[in-house]
Image (cartoon, helix red, strand yellow):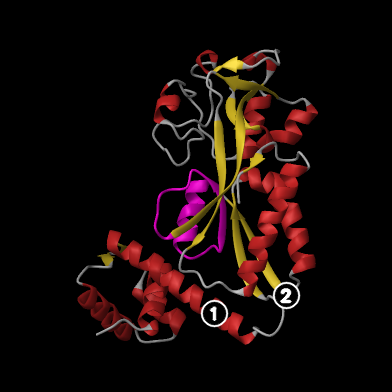
Amino acid sequence: MSLGLRQLKYFVAIADAGSLSRAAATLNVAQSALSHHLAEMEANLGVSLLERRARGVALTQAGQRFYEHARAILTALDKAEIDIRTIASSASGPITVGLCQTAVEVISLDLMSEAISGCPNVRLTLIEGLSPVLFEFLAAGQLDFAVVYNPPTDARFRAVPVLEEELFLVGSHEVIGRETTPVPLAQIPQGQIIGLSPIKETSAILQSPHLRAMIAPHANLELGSLNALVKALGAGLGGAILARATVRPHLESGIIHARRIIDPVLTRRLWILSLMDRPDTRAVREIGAILHKVLREAVAAGHWPARMIEG
């Protein structure tokens, strides 16, 4: 027996609700019917999708992967229906874009303005998050695009490199010195770099394990909030390795300052990710074009100090 859309909808509802009883109430179907469909799915797939617990259910490893596929299929179906219904008119429907913190800082306003003027019938949702979180949202079908760093190698993702930027030592004069001259990587203040994890490779700003090993991270702080990081830097609680675009307003105000890192020069790339099997709707194409446009313009205007690498 093959899986049907009803079973996918039931499974997603159970996973989202965390229990069969709550899912049954949400769907207005009998709990026994949900149990029957769940048993059929597990038998058909040959794996356990849910772990039964005293207060509900939890996804198994196989269940988590199946949930991501199911969410992506259902979301794609909804978008395909909207696209076909509006094929003769302008782009319309919901589009969700996940932005890393630097992208929020530099391009979010331009992206919103361009989308409103260029695609007035599209309902744009922007989600801010660290790159690893956005990877998870994209895999689960909750995003149409993710603007991120350090993308994983994943056959489900279409990954387009967009720009490359240098990284700087950033902090107060007390922590990184008053000089504006470049600082060799070997002279980075040890034990004072905030937010640099040698373990969480997808969240570390440096992809190279060798380079990360050369820097002792802060003994007490690791922050996933850009606002908190800027406050910590301004208060002299430590330094950070960041791109200038990430903290440009704070550099211009003099709250913190930056020194170029050399020996070696450190760079990172920004990528635009989407799902390979996502329907190529008119709304997706037009918002994707706007996304590339505002990035190019931000680089050209100097708002994002970087070089474009897209074709």
Query: Residue at image x 66%, y 31%?
Result: 231
Query: Residue at image x 26%, y 83%?
Result: 36
* Residue 57 appears in the rendering: no
Q: Position of residue 172 (x, y in %)?
A: 67, 20
User: From mark 2 to mark 1, how far is it between C-alphas?
Assistant: 16 Å
Query: Residue at image x 75%, y 49%?
Result: 297
Eyeballing the image, is 155 above or below 238? below
Q: Position of residue 192 (x, y in %)?
A: 53, 20
Dot 1 amino acid type: Ala
SS state under label 2:
loop
Q: Position of residue 54 (x, y in %)?
A: 28, 64
Q: Earlier in the sequence, mark 2 or mark 1?
A: 1
Residue beneath label 1, please?
Answer: 80
167 inside magenta stretch: no
Query: Residue at image x 50%, y 16%?
Result: 190
Residue beneath label 2, please?
Answer: 121
Check the picture and name the quadrant holding the N terminus: bottom left
Relative horizontal placement of residue 298, taking residue 307 as reference (left or right): right
Q: Nearer the viewer, residue 311 or 51?
A: 311
Relative horizontal placement of residue 306, taking residue 238 as reference (left or right): right
Q: Position of residue 78 (x, y in %)?
A: 53, 79
